[in-house]
Image (cartoon, grey):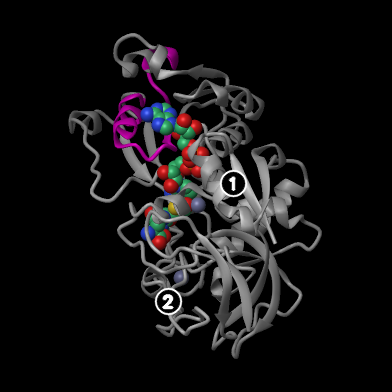
């Protein structure tokens, strides 16, 4: 079939909206009509050329929601008409990783996914002249129709609005999951969130859900304060307004250091500050931000010797097929909010405007509706 898609032709160039060929689903695969897709910072990270795994030409996009159109041979858990959210972290429920409760990083399709291919080692997308186009993070939601492995789809309730729940495909789950699944933050904890964008705001609402006593937000952009306060931030710190070193300032503000800190900037200097602002003896720092190719983190080992832990999280530690439908329920039941964070809705033709808004710090989440 043919479908309309925004194609990343090469690094650093705007996406090109065009008709492309899409082959039907093969063994274990599913054809999905994407109804809405969110533009995540990681799409921009790959488009800019900073992602060591970045490949071109490719159809980016990994946040989305849609409807199953056709299932390939062997697909048992889904049928046409089911509502689904694509998962860049699959959940096969049988690999060594899925069977270990310590991780959500299913590896069943990870190798081919990283090469921009379906599990059989080929792509379903091509240009009208036959040039192959690669998949991205196993999802390629910047296409009106896409093909994914069955294990890369969470089945969700049918009354949930696509233009809101698409954000659960990455930002919402990553932020809330970092608190609930990775940190397992306790009632009454003190926390610091670095970066109050599409991820950091969801860390904040996760901390509120967990019953944190203090939620400090740190951002260079004071325009983020209003939204962060609405989601539960109790204290705001703009590093530009702090005289001297930020670490002792934050340690003092949190009465000895935070129980949990979260990096949602992708900046390695910020990651160091986040680790060192943890409480001596037990504070845990969780890296969410994705840093550019070649970047490295550092601190004095003494920081770890004296009881701070440095951790990381992908997709908030969520097991997609199991946890994503529950997070959709939390949204539908009013336990979490999504609507205020979706600041812009665009047609696919304007997708590059969504990237411009993100660059300018003007959007939290821009969503493309098909
Ligand atoms: P964003 O651009 O919406 O937000 C980043 C925020 O950080 C902005 O508000 C910005 O003003 C602030 N900031 C930048 N530099 C700062 C500094 N030095 N000190 C304090 N604040 C600073 O981005 P986002 O969508 O929230 O994504 C955040 C990071 O998380 C990105 O690196 C993204 O790639 C990554 N990410 C990771 C996962 C995962 O599974 N680990 C999932 C999604 C996104
Ligand atoms: N090359 C990576 C993209 C960079 C990355 O680190 N991705 C994060 C998710 S960021 C979502 O916005 C990740 O969880 N990766 C898990 C993994 O197994 O790489 C990619 O995913 O292609
Ligand atoms: Zn993302
Ligand atoms: Zn698995």
- Res. 61 visible in picture: yes
Q: Which mark is residue 351?
A: none
Residue 260 magenta-drawn? Answer: yes
Task: Give the mark nearest the N terminus, 1 or 2.
Answer: 2
Q: Which mark is residue 117?
A: 2
Q: Nearer the viewer, residue 11 or 146?
A: 11
Residue shown at 62% from the left, 59% from the top: 64
Image position of 281 with respect to 328: above or below: above
**Residue position marked by numbered label 1 in the rendering:** 172
Lateral position of residue 71 relative to residue 264, left or right: right
Q: Nearer the viewer, residue 327 or 353?
A: 353
Q: CA distance from mark 1 to mark 2?
A: 26 Å
Residue shown at 61% from the left, 87% from the top: 72
- Res. 260 visible in picture: no
For disc 1, the neighbor class at 10 Å (few under 14, some 14 to 19, many from 20) is many
Residue at the left extreme, as displayed: 301
What secondary structure is marked by label 2?
Answer: loop
Quadrant of the rendered image containing residue 270: top left
Residue 309 percent location from the top left of the image = 32, 37
Residue shown at 36% from the left, 62% from the top: 54
Residue 137 percent location from the top left of the image = 46, 64
Image position of 22 with respect to 325: above or below: below
Residue at the right extreme, as displayed: 159
Q: Nearer the viewer, residue 126 or 249?
A: 126
Q: Quadrant of the C terminus?
A: bottom right
Residue 165 percent location from the top left of the image = 68, 53
Ligand 1 in which quarter? top left
Q: Nearer the viewer, mark 1 or mark 2?
A: 2
Lateral position of residue 114 relative to residue 346, left or right: left
Residue 312 percent location from the top left of the image = 37, 46
Question: Which region shows up in magenta?
Answer: 251-278
What secondary structure is marked by label 1?
Answer: helix
């Amino acid at each position: 079939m043919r479908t309309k898609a925004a194609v990343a032709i090469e690094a650093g160039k705007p996406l090109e909206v065009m008709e492309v060929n899409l082959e039907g689903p093969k063994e274990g695969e599913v054809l999905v009509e994407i109804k809405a897709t969110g533009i995540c910072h990681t799409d921009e990270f790959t488009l800019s050329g900073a992602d060591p795994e970045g490949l071109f030409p490719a159809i980016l996009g990994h946040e989305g929601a849609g409807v199953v159109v056709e299932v390939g041979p062997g697909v048992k858990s889904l049928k046409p008409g089911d509502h689904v959210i694509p998962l860049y972290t699959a959940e096969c429920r049988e690999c060594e990783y899925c069977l270990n409760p310590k991780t959500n990083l299913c590896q069943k399709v990870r190798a081919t996914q990283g090469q921009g291919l379906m599990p059989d080692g080929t792509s379903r997308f091509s240009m009208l002249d036959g040039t192959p186009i690669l998949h991205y993070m196993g999802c390629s939601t910047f296409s009106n129709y896409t093909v994914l492995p069955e294990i890369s789809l969470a089945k969700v309730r049918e009354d949930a609005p696509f233009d809101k729940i698409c954000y659960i495909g990455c930002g919402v789950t990553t932020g809330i999951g970092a608190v609930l699944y990775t940190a397992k933050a306790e009632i009454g904890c003190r926390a610091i969130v670095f970066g109050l964008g599409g991820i950091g705001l969801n860390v904040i609402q996760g901390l509120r859900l967990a019953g944190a006593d203090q939620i400090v937000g740190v951002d260079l952009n004071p325009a983020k304060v209003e939204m962060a306060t609405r989601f539960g931030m109790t204290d705001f710190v703009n590093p530009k307004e702090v005289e001297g070193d930020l670490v002792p300032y934050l340690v003092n503000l949190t009465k000895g250091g935070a129980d949990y800190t979260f990096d949602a900037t992708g900046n390695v200097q910020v990651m160091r500050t986040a680790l060192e602002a943890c409480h001596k003896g037990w504070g845990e720092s969780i890296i969410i931000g994705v840093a550019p190719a070649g970047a490295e983190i550092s601190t004095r080992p003494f920081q770890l010797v004296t009881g701070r832990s440095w951790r990381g999280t992908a997709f908030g530690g969520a097991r997609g097929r199991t946890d994503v439908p529950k997070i959709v329920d939390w949204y539908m039941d009013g336990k979490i909010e999504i609507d205020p964070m979706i600041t812009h809705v665009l047609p696919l033709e304007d997708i590059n405007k969504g990237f411009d808004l993100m660059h300018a710090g003007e959007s939290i989440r821009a969503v493309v509706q098909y």
